[in-house]
Image (cartoon, rainbow, N blue to C red):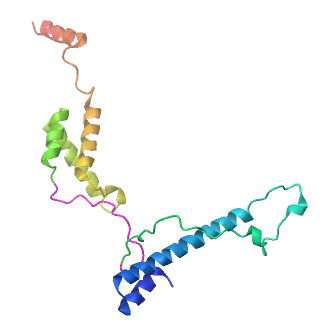
Amino acid sequence: MSIPATVRAMRAAGVGDSQIVDTVLAMAEEALAKGRARQAKYRNNNDIGDVTNVNNVSDVTNPSPEQKPPTPQKTQTPTLPPPVSPTGKPAPPSRGRALPADWRPSEQFWRWAAEKGHSRDVCDQSLEEMREWADANRNRQIARKADWCSALKGWVRKAAKNRKGTDPPKNDLMSASRRNIERMANL
């Protein structure tokens, strides 16, 4: 019987929680021991040894007692099984959430942006682009984030990196030359 089915049957019979936990732990340990035994048997059966000596071939269907894997020793402390959903399957880990329609960046984000020297315009533009992207991908797993402020920081960093070099520098020799040419042209 599976662990979830056993737990349901024990709950229906009115068995106490501590006894259920003990039973589940025993079942989990038994399953681990069976798995280790299968692995050891697989390793022993797949050890080809000396392929040039035909007399060294063992009977796989009836292994001798010295070929059987040793019974596993209890070396690990028992752990609780993963949480179980109402259907009896393990509950999946949290994978974030979609961007709420009324979401706003925290004050901590604005402090971070000010410390890094990002303008309010760049942050607002990045926020708008991130909202459009999240809305366009709302049914995909990629648009679910555990921390939307961290995601927005990435959008702002990318926008600031892409903006570098687009504004002409104001204090270089070429800019000064252009300004002088424009002044002379206007005389």
Q: Residue at x 20, y 60 (%)?
A: 100
Q: Is residue 164 toward the left or the right of residue 50 in the image?
A: left
Q: x, y (%) of residue 86?
A: 36, 80
Would you identify the image quadrant in which residue 101 lies? bottom left
Would you identify the image quadrant in which residue 59 lies? bottom right
- Extreme residue in the bottom direction: 13
- Up the image or down, 84 lies above or below 103; here it is below
Q: Is residue 59 toward the left or the right of residue 159 in the image?
A: right
- Nearer the observer, 114 or 31: 31
For the question of whether residue 118 can be seen, the reply is no
- Up the image or down, 106 lies above or below 144; here it is above
Q: Residue at x 25, y 32 (%)?
A: 163
**Quadrant housing the C terminus:** top left
Q: x, y (%) of residue 136?
A: 29, 56
- Nearer the observer, 5 or 169: 5
Q: Main secondary structure of the magenta part?
A: loop
For the question of whether residue 39 can be seen, the reply is yes
Q: x, y (%) of residue 139?
A: 32, 63
Magenta region, residue range: 86-103
